[in-house]
Image: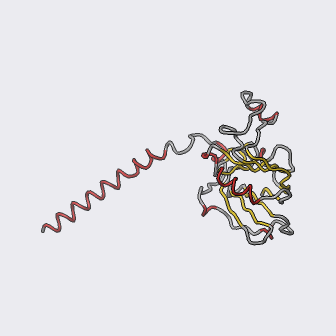
Amino acid sequence: MSRNKLSRRSTLLGFGASLFTPVVLSAQSTDAFPSQEAPISQQPPVKRNISSFQQQSWQDHFDELGVGCLLADVASRAVHYWGGDGETFRLYPSSVPMSEELTKRGYTKVVRKAKNPTWTPTPSMRERDPSLPVRMAGGVGNPLGSRGMYLSWPAYLVHGTHDTRKIGRQSSSGCIGLYNQHVEELYELVKVGTQVRIL
């Protein structure tokens, strides 16, 4: 008889806890990300974890490895890197452009690299937001993060970010962004002349 009471009590407590859990979870999650991100609502849902990354092979995108290949997959918000040695491979979550109009797709290459790069907003960026500075030296607060790899397309980079909320989101004005620790690792691997495809 006492086993039935204990069993009933456990069941009621478990049921009560399950009703309370969604309230706690929703309260914890409301501040996790900015409340407005209009472009994402117009896109199909994408999971923000490694299971959403699509497996890629460099042979599907490049004729040869050369000194290395870098693929920025805008749909799955990931950067794939294959080293020229044929063995090195890295996969990183990334930020992507805020809209399709800001997304440049196609083939390019890394033409220059910089540590703590200086940021110079483009005229169109300053037109959209007149409060932007004309130029910002590298360091904390600079939107290019700790490393930048410049592409042959003017004003397009693969770079870091100090704002970690941007990774996995549509948050850039055209560039591909990485966590600083990831871009620092990639920076050491990527050589000038590395082939790049924005897909």
The N terminus, quarter of image: bottom left
**Front-lying residue, 95 or 39:** 95
Q: Residue at x 60, y 45 (%)?
A: 165
Q: Residue at x 78, y 68 (%)?
A: 58
Residue 81, image quadrant: bottom right
Residue 2 relative to residue 42: left or right: left
The image's colour scheme reads secondary structure
Q: Point out the residue furthest to the top here.
A: 131
- Residue 127: where, in percent of width, then height? 78, 30
- Residue 39: where, in percent of width, then height? 67, 44
Residue 144 relative to residue 59: left or right: left
Q: Residue at x 76, y 45 (%)?
A: 174
Q: Point out the residue furthest to the left here.
A: 1
Q: Residue at x 69, y 53 (%)?
A: 184
Residue 142, image quadrant: top right
- Residue 119: where, in percent of width, then height? 76, 38
The C terminus, quarter of image: bottom right
**Front-lying residue, 5 or 134:** 134
What is the total number of numbered labels drawn onto the structure image? 0
Q: Tell me if residue 193 comes above or below residue 62 in the rendering.
A: above
- Residue 160: where, in percent of width, then height? 69, 48
Q: Tell me if residue 67 comes above or below residue 184 in the rendering.
A: below
Residue 118, image quadrant: top right
